[in-house]
Amino acid sequence: MKQINVLLLLACLFMSTALAAQTDEEKKVMAAKEAAAKAELGWKKGGGLGLDLSGLGIVNPRLGAGTNRLGFGGVLNLFAARKGEKTFWDNSFSMLLSAQRLGGKDNPFQKNNDILRLNSRYGYNIIKDKLFFAVDAAAETQVLPTYVGNLLDGPEEDLLSEFLAPARISVAPGIDFRPNPHMKFFFAPVGFNFIYVGNDVLAQLPGQPLGNEIRDNKIQNNRFQLGYIAKAEYNNKYFNDRIAFLSRVGWFADYRKNLNGNVLWQNSMDIQIFKGLALNVFGELFYDHFSKAIVKEVPAGTAPDALEPFLGLNSTYTGGFFIKYNRIF
């Protein structure tokens, strides 16, 4: 009987020791998770800069040898994201700008690309750090003016577009769903899209994203749209973080125009060369039901108000690559 009591006592002591050890281990795991979660709180900032510079010079070129060329450009991406215990605030800025000049110094530069974008989204946690009530805002315009012939300079009567002409601004309250760190979904049943052309003369040209809307017998320089907004994003890293991939798509549908609207689909891949230095390959598709694209080559000397025969409703595709330097601070 005494032996049984001793065995029971030893068993109880073993079980209590094991439970205590298990409890200590669970506490350590929980503490590590809490420390990791706290480490993610606060601001995280960073950016990337890619440059493109090329040139070719010929003195006394032989017949058929070609001509001088000078090209420059770049892509700039900045982000600032703040994570709180119940909230997040994601902000991004991107600018893509490039131009080239063919021939001598008396020839004007031609524009290759010119896009300026701002994005911001603020969210408050509703369910288990995955479902948030959020407000999404975005703005887009260009930096430099564009003249007939896709030139950066020219007579005033040849001006086609400039800073804030046009500009697109959208604001939408909705639901943000983040099932894992790599995927984001946003939907707003009611969103506001504002298109503005800050030049009354440019607002009347064919191809501007105003749908030639006429009110009070006058072509407008602004357009207010009401509709739903849907956005999705996927980002991930592969091969020991040597390749980073990002894809995001956004769609706006105007309730008052039979759900016609615009779509922007962006894709980007960074292939790491050295730490912080990467080859960036990017491509995007853009379509706006109220903005026409150039679908035929425009002959030299065509007046801005005579572009209509060369325009059409079509998607715009953009792609390229840069050597880019990334840094998080």
Image: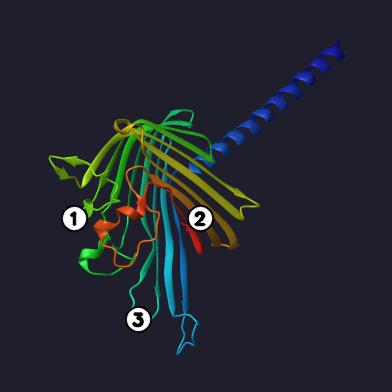
Residue 80 placement, left or right of 196: right
The answer to which of marks 3 and 2 sits earlier in the sequence is 3
Indicate the secondary structure of the residue bearing disc 2. Answer: strand
The answer to which of marks 2 and 1 sits earlier in the sequence is 1
Residues at marks 3 and 2 touching, judged by CB atoms closer than 8 Å: no
Residue type pointed to by label 2:
Phe
Residue 130 drawn at (x, y percent):
49, 31
* Distance between the alpha carbons at the discs numbered 2 and 1: 34 Å
Residue type pointed to by label 1:
Val
Query: Disc 1 designates what residue?
Result: 201
* Distance between the alpha carbons at the discs numbered 3 and 1: 31 Å
Query: Disc 3 designates what residue?
Result: 105
Question: Considering only vertical position in the picture, is 166 above or below 290?
Answer: below
Q: Residue at x 58, y 34 (%)?
A: 30
Residue 165 drawn at (x, y percent):
26, 54
Indicate the secondary structure of the residue bearing disc 1. Answer: helix
Quarter placement of the N terminus? top right
Mark nearest the camera among 3 and 1 is: 1
Indicate the secondary structure of the residue bearing disc 3. Answer: loop
Residue 120 placement, left or right of 163: right
- Residue furthest to the top in view is 1
